[in-house]
Amino acid sequence: MPPPRASRSARRRAEARPAAPAVRLALLRAVTLPRVLAALWLAATAELLVLTALVVHHYTTWYLAIDQFG
């Protein structure tokens, strides 16, 4: 005995659904290991530059404050 057929409205709802899995699959293909590693390297480099700038600013301010006394 064959399985019962879906109703016409159920078939139309199934046809009208967007193809979301294809978009997810394309996104998963776009995220590759080299891209992730490049993003991590860029974030680490940016953090190093920002922290270096903050330390230089701190020491420059300290030296200028001490220089006033002397």
Image: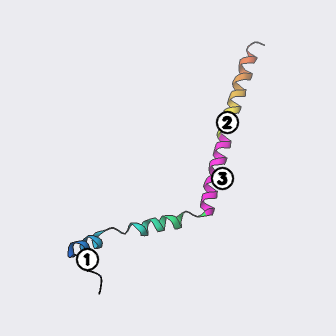
Q: Check if residue 42 falls in the magenta segment.
A: yes
Cα–Cα gap, marks 2 and 3: 18 Å
> Going 55% across and 62% down the picture, which residue do you hit?
31
Please, what is the three-letter code of the amino acid marked with disc 2? Ala
Q: Residue at 69%, 27% (x, y): give it.
A: 58
Which residue is outermost to the bottom? 1
> For this view, does 44 lie left or right of residue 4?
right
| Labels 1 and 3 touching (C-beta < 8 A) | no
Q: Residue at x 45, y 65 (%)?
A: 24
Which circle's residue, 1 or 3, is located before the other in the chain? 1
Q: Tell me the number on the disc at residue 41.
A: 3
Q: Is residue 10 above or below residue 5?
A: above
Range covered by the magenta-colored residues? 33-49
Q: Nearer the viewer, residue 11 or 18?
A: 11
Q: Nearer the viewer, residue 52 or 29?
A: 29
Q: Main secondary structure of the magenta part?
A: helix
Query: In the rendered structure, which amino acid carries the disc numbered 3?
Result: Trp
SS for dot 3: helix
Q: Nearer the viewer, residue 42 or 68?
A: 42
- Image location (x, y in percent) of residue 30: 53, 65
Quarter-of-image position of residue 5: bottom left
